[in-house]
Image: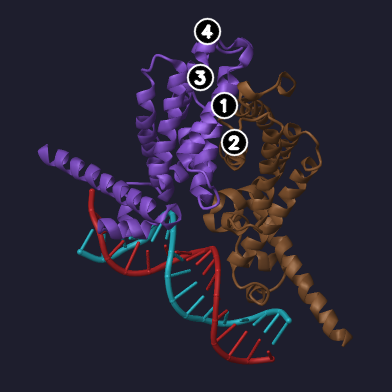
Chain colours: A purple, B brown, C red, D cyan
Amino acid sequence: MGSTERRQRQKEQLREQILEAARTIVVQEGFDALSMRKIADAVEYAPATLYLHFQSRDEIARELCVRGFRELWNFLAPAAPLADPLERLRVVAEGYVRFAMSHPETYRLIFMEDPKYTGTVLRGGPDDPGEQSLLLMVRAFEELQEQGRLAKDAVPRRLSEVFWAGMHGVVSLKITCSDFLQTPAEEMTTTLTRALLDGLISPATRPRAARLR
Amino acid sequence: MGSTERRQRQKEQLREQILEAARTIVVQEGFDALSMRKIADAVEYAPATLYLHFQSRDEIARELCVRGFRELWNFLAPAAPLADPLERLRVVAEGYVRFAMSHPETYRLIFMEDPKYTGTVLRGGPDDPGEQSLLLMVRAFEELQEQGRLAKDAVPRRLSEVFWAGMHGVVSLKITCSDFLQTPAEEMTTTLTRALLDGLISPATRPRAARLR
DNA sequence: GTCTATAACTCGATAGAC
DNA sequence: GTCTATCGAGTTATAGAC
């Protein structure tokens, strides 16, 4: 049954082409400009053909979210093996912002467009990609706590969410109103990171060696 | 010419009705659901009539942004007369988050929807509403600096932008994926505010009295 | 199995009758 | 000043020809 396999391969190929075309449209024209007609034009098939591979425009958008988030992870992963949890958090922030600034439309689709898309990667379940990424930060704060560099009553999960919110604030403002902001994204990130980590890690429990400046 | 004045009043009344109907739709169904037809239905006029009062749907959206931002200012203004700049910043943050959480769809329209709407209130000119609001924070940081509670080489404008980004991050994440976040918005805000202000106001230059905890 | 053609529905905006 | 009627373009999705 070699022909069946070939068919299967071709089918998957078209699926990839559709997703690639969709991604290109989103990146170049924004998510609002993504329509089934436009995708169909790009892959040179009739609009209806797309429905043989995807149930709806929504399903395509969700798949773009999943893949986009996977790409985001590639920017965060280099931080994981770093020994110092503080350094790890700084590298996470740097990677996060670098991803968002180099893929603004993808970032917008995943985190700023619609809760239903954000929910695709951040459902809150223990196995979803968002939880994995947050865990990278949670662990860092836990280690800081174990090392006595963080107040005993601090809640790592909460600090991680605040830390994430800070990064998200910087990049989403940069995406929506970069003209208004006078400070470059990277500068905002370092200022934010320094201030936050310096502030979160309370002076009382922080040995001199762990100081950020 | 009393009848002319009456006409004028009626015309303005309809304009208000249109805006009020539009605001209701945005608040209840979100900005995407805002259509000229729906507004026309709500005010019991034909769709074409709306174009006698507004050039386009866009112009209605922009007016909603301007009014929404005015309402935001009402939440921030109570902070202005406070003597202690640090306290002022805390109250600004509290008001900002309270506005966003009580008017999520309005907040989304102004700050998260489209740069062209955000630009309506944040053009970057010296007279726009956004600049005014940011000035509230800039002044607070300047005073902290004058009082020697902030490093001399710190840039108030930059700190304000970072401070604002932090608040925006918290509320926009809460709006887009509140299910994923385990921490309530108010708690995130106090954690963020404490950490940021504690971190921004560097230990070296900060007298004991100004400490946040 | 594949794809064309089209249904059935949105929308914003306008021309012209009254 | 307001309405009816409609244009033209957009959308998702499906029925049925090939």
Q: Amino acid at mark 1?
A: Leu
User: Is disc 4 placed on a helix, strand or loop?
Assistant: helix
Closer to the camera: disc 4 or disc 1? 1
Q: Three-letter amino acid code at disc 4?
A: Glu
Residue that appears at 49% across and 41% down: A171
Q: How far apart are the two marked residues, 3 and 4, measured between alpha carbons?
A: 12 Å
N-term mark: 3 or 4 = 3
- Which residue does the numbered mark 3 point to in the structure image? A138
Counting residues from the N terminus, which is met first, the one under dot 4 or under dot 1?
A: 4
Q: Closer to us: mark 1 or mark 3?
A: 1
Same chain? Circles 1 and 3: yes
Q: Quadrant of the N terminus of chain A?
A: top left
Q: Could you tell me which chain the residue with mark 2 belongs to?
A: B
Disc nearest the viewer among 3 and 2 = 2
Give the quarter of the image for residue B179. Answer: top right
For mark 3, give the secondary structure: helix
| Label at residue B166 | 2
CB-based contact (under 8 Å), mark 1 and mark 3: no
User: Horizontal placement of B135 versus B113: left or right?
Assistant: right
Q: In what element is the residue under mark 1?
A: helix
